[in-house]
Amino acid sequence: MSKSIQEIKRELEQAPGSERGRLLEQYASDTRSGVVRLLQQFRRKEEKLLEERKRLWGMQEFERQYARCAVICGIDEAGRGPLAGPVAAAAVVLPKDCEILYLNDSKKLSPKRREALYEEIMEKAEAVGVGLTDAARIDEINILQATYEAMRAAVGQLGMVPEVLLNDAVTIPGLAMEQVSIVKGDARSVSIAAASILAKVTRDRLMAEYDAQYPQYGFALHKGYGTAAHIEALKAHGPCPIHRKTFITHFL
């Protein structure tokens, strides 16, 4: 007796990837229209998965290039441009056989996808570190030096010493290990992409907390960036303690 369409669907959903291909071939002779549509859907999913794995392979170019290094660390930041809040940096060491589907530059991902990837990175990474430099320190030493400070703090929190740092378009002063500056690195390296997601989600969550303290500015919506609504609120209420004074002088 033929299996029901629901039984076939359940079998395909539960099968590991290596087994699913065999099942698709096995049921290819079933001419029921529901089965034909079901198999087409699963084949499209398999094709998309293959394309995603090819994309990730391309994003592992630098990890393969430095495979001689036992500890490869990706570094990125979030929040250099906003008018308020800290700049955040993250350092991530991924296992060499790690697969995290849909890793990408955090700016290219939806908030929901970023949150899901954040949890997966935290679960699968060998080590992570996050550094924050607050608005007062940014005003004191400038945003570039504050970013470097946050990056050094992130590396210091790893609990291990990387042999090489893969950085998004910067070379960090004050660190002795080998560094590789990669232009658009958050879209070209899985390690940097993972760091960009951790930095972005960490900072976004923090800005949501600040929104509860200073609700008149709308930090949960714009995360401190200079949107029209933020600038209007700044002019109406003046700055709060997390505003970067050196960034807002021409608005007030």
Image (cartoon, rainbow, N blue to C red):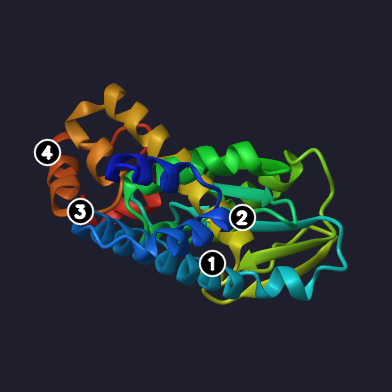
115 or 151: nearer the eye? Answer: 115
Give the amino acid at mark 4: Ala
Q: Amino acid at mark 3?
A: Thr
Q: Please, what is the three-letter code of the amino acid marked with disc 2?
A: Glu
Q: In this figure, which residue is indicated by the disc labeled 3?
A: 227
Earlier residue among tags 2 and 1: 1
* Residue 213 x/y as whole percent: 30, 22
CA separation, marks 2 and 1?
A: 9 Å
User: Which x, y percent locates residue 240?
Assistant: 30, 33
Nearer-the-camera pick, 237 or 168: 168
Q: How crowded is the residue under tag 3: few (<14 C-alpha within 10 Å), some, or many (20+)?
A: some
Name the foreground residue: 240 vs 166: 166
CB within 8 Å, label 4 to label 1: no
Amino acid beneath label 1: Arg
Q: Earlier in the sequence, mark 3 or mark 1?
A: 1
Please give the label number shown on residue 98: none
**Quarter occupied by residue 30:** bottom left
| Location of mark 2 (residue) | 99
State the CA–CA distance, disc 4 to disc 1. Answer: 50 Å
Q: How far is the residue under mark 4 from the one under mark 3?
A: 14 Å
Any part of residue 196 in sight = yes
Residue 53's label in the rendered image is 1
Between label 2 and label 3, give the one nearer the viewer. 2
What numbered label is drawn on residue 236? 4
Q: Cβ–Cβ below 8 Å for labels 2 and 1?
A: yes
Crowding near the residue tagged with mark 4, few <14, some 14–19, many ≥20 C-alpha atoms within 10 Å:
few
Between label 4 and label 3, give the one nearer the viewer: 3
Determine contact: label 2, label 3, CB under 8 Å.
no
* Residue 100 as seen in the image, left or right of residue 124: left
CA distance separating discs 3 and 1: 37 Å
